[in-house]
Amino acid sequence: MEKKKHCLNCEESFEGRKDRKFCSDYCKSNFHYELNKGKKDLFFLKVNKQLKLNRRLLRTFNKSGKSTVRIERLLSLGFNPNFFTHYWKNKKGDVYLFVYEYGFLKRNENNKLKF
């Protein structure tokens, strides 16, 4: 006779394979969510959070399709130019960095660094 198992999440008894630990997919998901909720952000979550912030800032400042913004302004709002999704190099050799669909290029205009 098989011993009844108890769900690690809700502690209800259930039947099933020997190695099964949860009574449902919901309980499995909830158990792991609660387990990881208190942990510090994982690396990929930090990267994704920064990419989303960079994209939001570029979208905010780029209403007309082409804008120039002082680097200090973007950096003060949390923009980090080291986080981008891809790049493109034009025929002049300028390298545009992109955060999803928004691109930026570092320039020096009137002795002021701008994107």
Image (cartoon, grey):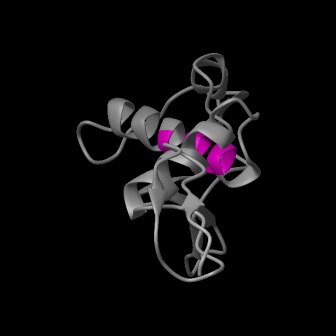
Q: Position of residue 41 (x, y in %)?
A: 71, 38
Q: Position of residue 108 (x, y in %)?
A: 68, 39
Q: In the rendered image of this protein, does residue 91 appear above or below residue 44?
A: below
Q: Is residue 87 left or right of residue 29?
A: right
Residue at x-position 34% and y-position 30%: 60
Q: Position of residue 67 (x, y in %)?
A: 38, 38
* Residue placed most toward the observer, 65 or 102: 102
Query: What is the quadrant of the C terminus in the image?
Result: top right
Predominant SS along the magenta part: helix
Residue at x-position 53% and y-position 45%: 11
Residue at x-position 51% and y-position 35%: 53
Q: In the rendered image of this protein, does residue 13 appear above or below residue 36?
A: below
Asked which quadrant contains residue 17, the reply is bottom right
* Residue placed most toward the observer, 93 or 24: 24
Q: Residue furthest left?
A: 64
Query: What is the quadrant of the N terminus in the image?
Result: bottom right
Q: Is residue 66 left or right of residue 69?
A: left
Magenta residues (range): 45-52
Q: Position of residue 36 (x, y in %)?
A: 67, 42
Q: Residue furthest front?
A: 1
Question: Can residue 67 be seen?
Answer: yes
Question: Can residue 115 be seen?
Answer: no
* Residue placed most toward the observer, 84 or 49: 49
Q: How many marks?
A: 0
Residue at x-position 60% and y-position 50%: 8
Q: Please say whether residue 61 is one of the residues in the magenta stretch.
A: no
